[in-house]
Each structure stands twice: as C-alpha cells, then as structure tokens.
C-alpha cells in the first residue's frame, strides 16, 4: 500500500508541474492494462479480445442481464428437436467493406469454426452442428446430431464475410465485421483505434501496463476512462478527485487458481485441498480488494439459472490444510515446493504474493513467476505450469463446463488447460447437453458443480466487481455485469470550454 501512496504523491507533483493536457484531442481514449491478442472472434478467448470483437462484429444472438438468450442479428424457431431455423433481421447486415451480410456468411463462419484444421478454441461448443443449409439470403437452417435446447445460446460467434474467409483473410489484425465500429489503425500493441460508424467518433484503446501511469494519464486527460485492473488504494484515492467519477457494479468475472493435473504434486487431490483450505479469501476480499469482490464457489454465480447456491466453498482452515499436507508427506519442517505463474500486472502479482505468504504458513513454499501477458497466456494454454491464477469473463451458458472440464477439451480443442479427466464429469456434461427439460438440465449442472467441488481441478476464488474510473466530461458509459465495452457505442465527450 505504501508503494501506491508514494506513487500517487509523485503523480500529484507531476500534475502540478505539467498542468492540464491538450484539450484539443477529439478521440475518446480508453486505458487498457493489456492489448487484445486477436480481433478474430473465432479465436478470441482473452477478456480484452472478447470485449473489443463485440464492437467489431455482430452475432446471431446475445444475452440479457438475466443470462437469457435474446436476438441480435437473427430470430429463431425450433422446427424439430434437432432442427433450428434462424432468420436474419434488417440491422447489422452491412460489413465494413460495404458488402451485405447474408445467410452464406453465417454458414461460412460456423463451418470455419467447425473445421478441425483451423483449431478454433470454440469448436467444441458447436460440435453438435451436423449440417448447415442456406434457404435464402435471410434464412439459414442448422441441423444437429442430437437434441440441444440451449443451441440458440451457442450462436455467439461474430459473423465474418464468406468471400474473405475463403481467401484466408487475416481477421486477426484486419477485422471485417458488421459491428458498430470498424478498425482505423493498429500499428502495434500500444494503441488500437476504432471508428464509430454512426457519427465518425474515434475510439482509442491505449495499452498502459502500469496502473500508476494509467491514472496519471487519466488525471491529465490523456485518456478518458479506465475499467478495472486498478489497485483498490488507487481507486479509493481517485474517488476523491474533482475531475473523476468512480463507479462500481457487481460483476460475474470469475477468478480462480488452476492446476496442472498431470503434475505429480498438483495432480494430488490432498495437495489441492490443502491449498484451498490455506487461502483466506475473506481476508483478501476485505482488506486487499476493499470489498470489491464476492466469494465464488463455482464458475456460475448462484443467481444463474444453472448455478448451485448450496455450495459453500472450501473454508479457510490452516490446521486442516496442515493435516492434509501431512498425509501427502509434507510439513513446516519438510515443505512442499511449487511454482505459481501469473501475469506481471502489479495487482495480480500482489495477490499472488499474499497467497504465497498464506501457503507458506502451512508448509508450502511457492516460487512466483510473473510474465508479460503474451508469454504467461501462452504457457497456460500449453500446459507449462504447476499452478496459476486467471479469470473467466462473460460466462453466460453452462456449456462452459464442457469447454473447461471435459476430457476432450484439452487445448487447442477447448480450455481444459489443467488436463483434467474424469469419466463421471464427462458423462454428466454429455447427459446435460442432450436433456430437453431445462429444469432437469439445471439439476445435472448442479450435480456437476458438486463433483467439481469434490475433485477440485481448480480453486474458485471470487467474482470481481467491475470498477470504472471516468472523467466527468465523458457521458453515456454504463458498467455491465460481464465487464463488456458495449457502452462505447453511445459514449460522448462534452466539449471542454477551457481551463
């Protein structure tokens, strides 16, 4: 905390010396802690990529605040148990290159995701698609290999132009969608510029890894808003600045500790349970996160229709942790040694250091290894870790359990990064997917969450609140539960009349 206070005092001095920033900037600038990995919705899995691709592309469907499926590009009807028809509406039908979005583009997008050689991480979520038939420019049919009452909710991938897919266009760096914004410039990972089509407003995403630098630029007016990834001390300090509004909203971003289950140490259930009981989540949330999170017991929040509100989590119990470690052959005198990978984000590194200290008190010595985001994320996807911490954003559908925990979903076929394999878990996932009754399906998913609680392939930590720091001359931005950037479509800047 002292470090952040010193840094903030330094900020004040800089502000006093340098005065106000140039007020002639016409763009709206959003400060990020990390750049997007890709702008191709078929391959985006990190939070920033997901949130920005939502601005560039339109999807067939979307979700409301209650996690219920709603139309986006299309409405749908179920013609039979395994046959769905989607009818495109009038909005969002023009790609950024001027061509019209038709059912052929929908077919080409989903066929490219299903093509195994493309290695889309979203392939496993739509594997039940057996056939895609274009009826006319506005209507496309999907025939499934089995019944799936949740199928409309799987149609969330942004639609790309068929003619560019066939030419193997690089959507990664040169996106072409039909969303409310299009790419202006992305020369390097420090600055990404989008053009809002309705009024030609430029929206800039500026990557500033150091939170202190982001705050300095926010206060000077060099950026206009920052969402998340700020230490609580800085957020509290910003709350008292005349030029800044600080807003908070309960979020659904799920933070967890993951394990390599092929490792002889973290693959041991005794060790994973010992770690779970050694982490004092309540103290971290209260004193470090300043109550800006809620404890999580499973992936889905308890108010989700498939959530399991009965799970109470692994309680903080250092004595139980020591007893479990003793069974595994370790103690304070003979400590277990593990490596823990995290990003070099200062606050994430701070949380890792606190967890390191809590684990040391029960007999686990943790070697923290922090990396830039690209290196860290690459290691996690490749299984080069013993334990790590990450977050999931935008979780809406319970099919996320297949994507993360089914034995067939090891990267690149999904996000089973810990190489978890459990026949009973696989079986329940598969039963839930073909269950027609949503009530019975929810029961299966609650049973599944109990199994995951018992086998502990990951340790749920908390659902982080969404925190926004925004200049008071910026209007129209609203926080969402999943932390998306959708309000950039309506955000405006009040013209500065001078100092």
Image (cartoon, grey):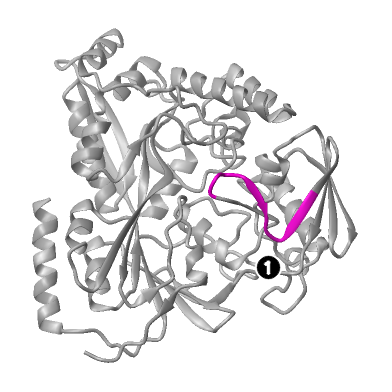
**Residue 88, position as x, y percentages in the image:** 78, 61
**In the image, residue 76 above or below residue 245:** above
Residue assigned mark 1: 169
Q: Nearer the viewer, residue 89 or 367?
A: 89
**Quadrant of the image occupied by residue 6:** bottom left
**Quadrant of the image occupied by residue 14:** bottom left
Q: Secondary structure at mark 1?
A: loop
Q: Residue at x 75, y 29 (%)?
A: 436
Can I make out residue 37 in this image?
A: no
**Image quadrant in which the C terminus is located:** bottom left
Residue range (magenta): 65-76
Please say whether residue 68 is one of the residues in the magenta stretch.
Answer: yes
**Residue 200, position as x, y percentages in the image:** 54, 84
Q: Residue at x 73, y 70 (%)?
A: 93
Q: Nearer the viewer, residue 479 or 411?
A: 479
Q: Residues within 10 Å of mark 1 (few under 14, many from 20)?
A: some
Please say whether residue 103 is one of the residues in the magenta stretch.
Answer: no
**In the image, residue 82 above or below residue 321:** below
**In the image, residue 390 above or below residue 418:** below
Q: Is residue 296 left or right of residue 53?
A: left
**Quadrant of the image occupied by residue 365:** top left
Q: Nearer the viewer, residue 490 or 43?
A: 490
**Residue 486, position as x, y percentages in the image:** 51, 63
Q: Is residue 497 left or right of residue 47?
A: left
Number of numbered tags placed on the structure image? 1
**Residue 259, position as x, y percentages in the image:** 41, 30
Can I make out residue 424 in this image?
A: yes
Which residue is at the far right? 135
Q: Nearer the viewer, residue 129 or 469?
A: 469
């Amino acid at each position: 905390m002292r470090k952040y206070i010193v840094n903030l005092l330094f900020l004040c001095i800089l502000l006093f010396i340098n005065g106000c920033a140039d007020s002639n900037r016409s763009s709206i600038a959003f400060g990020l802690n990390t750049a997007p990995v890709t702008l191709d919705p078929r391959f985006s899995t990190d939070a920033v990529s997901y949130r920005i691709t939502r601005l560039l592309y339109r999807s067939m469907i979307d979700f409301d605040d209650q996690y219920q499926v709603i139309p986006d590009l299309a409405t749908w009807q179920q013609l039979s148990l395994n046959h769905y028809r989607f009818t495109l509406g009038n909005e969002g039908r023009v790609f950024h290159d001027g061509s019209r979005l038709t059912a052929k583009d929908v077919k080409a997008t989903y066929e490219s995701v299903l093509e195994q050689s493309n290695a889309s991480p979203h392939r496993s979520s739509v594997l039940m698609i057996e056939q895609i038939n274009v009826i006319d420019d506005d209507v496309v049919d999907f025939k499934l290999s089995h019944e799936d009452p949740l199928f409309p909710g799987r149609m969330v991938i942004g639609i790309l132009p068929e003619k560019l897919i066939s030419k193997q266009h690089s959507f990664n760096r040169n996106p072409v969608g039909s969303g409310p914004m299009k790419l202006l410039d992305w020369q390097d990972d420090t600055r990404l510029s989008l053009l809002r089509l309705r009024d030609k407003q430029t929206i800039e995403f500026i990557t500033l890894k150091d939170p202190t630098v982001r705050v300095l630029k926010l206060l000077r007016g060099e950026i206009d808003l920052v969402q998340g990834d700020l230490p609580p001390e800085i957020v509290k300090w910003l709350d008292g600045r005349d030029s800044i509004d600080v807003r908070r909203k309960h979020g659904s971003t799920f933070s967890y500790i993951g394990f390599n289950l092929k490792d002889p140490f973290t693959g041991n259930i005794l060790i994973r349970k010992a770690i779970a009981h050694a982490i004092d989540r309540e103290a971290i949330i209260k004193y470090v996160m300043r109550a800006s999170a809620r404890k999580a017991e499973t992936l889905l929040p308890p108010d989700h229709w498939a959530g399991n509100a009965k799970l109470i989590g692994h309680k903080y119990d250092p004595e139980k942790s020591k007893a479990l470690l003793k069974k595994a052959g370790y103690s304070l005198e003979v400590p277990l040694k593990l490596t823990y990978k995290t990003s070099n984000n200062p606050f994430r590194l701070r949380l890792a250091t606190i967890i390191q200290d809590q684990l040391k008190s029960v007999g686990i010595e943790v070697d923290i290894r922090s990396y830039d985001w690209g290196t860290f994320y690459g290691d996690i996807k490749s299984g080069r870790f013993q334990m790590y911490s990450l977050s999931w954003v935008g979780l809406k559908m319970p099919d996320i359990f297949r994507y993360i925990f089914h034995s067939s979903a090891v990267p690149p076929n999904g996000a089973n990064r810990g190489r978890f394999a459990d026949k009973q878990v696989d079986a329940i996932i598969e039963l839930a997917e073909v269950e027609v009754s949503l009530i019975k399906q929810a029961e299966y998913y609650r049973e599944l969450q109990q199994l995951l609680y018992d086998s502990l392939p990951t340790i749920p930590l908390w659902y982080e609140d969404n925190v926004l720091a925004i200049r008071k001359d910026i209007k129209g931005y609203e926080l969402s539960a999943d932390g998306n950037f959708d309000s950039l479509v309506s955000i405006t800047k009040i013209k500065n009349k001078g100092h």
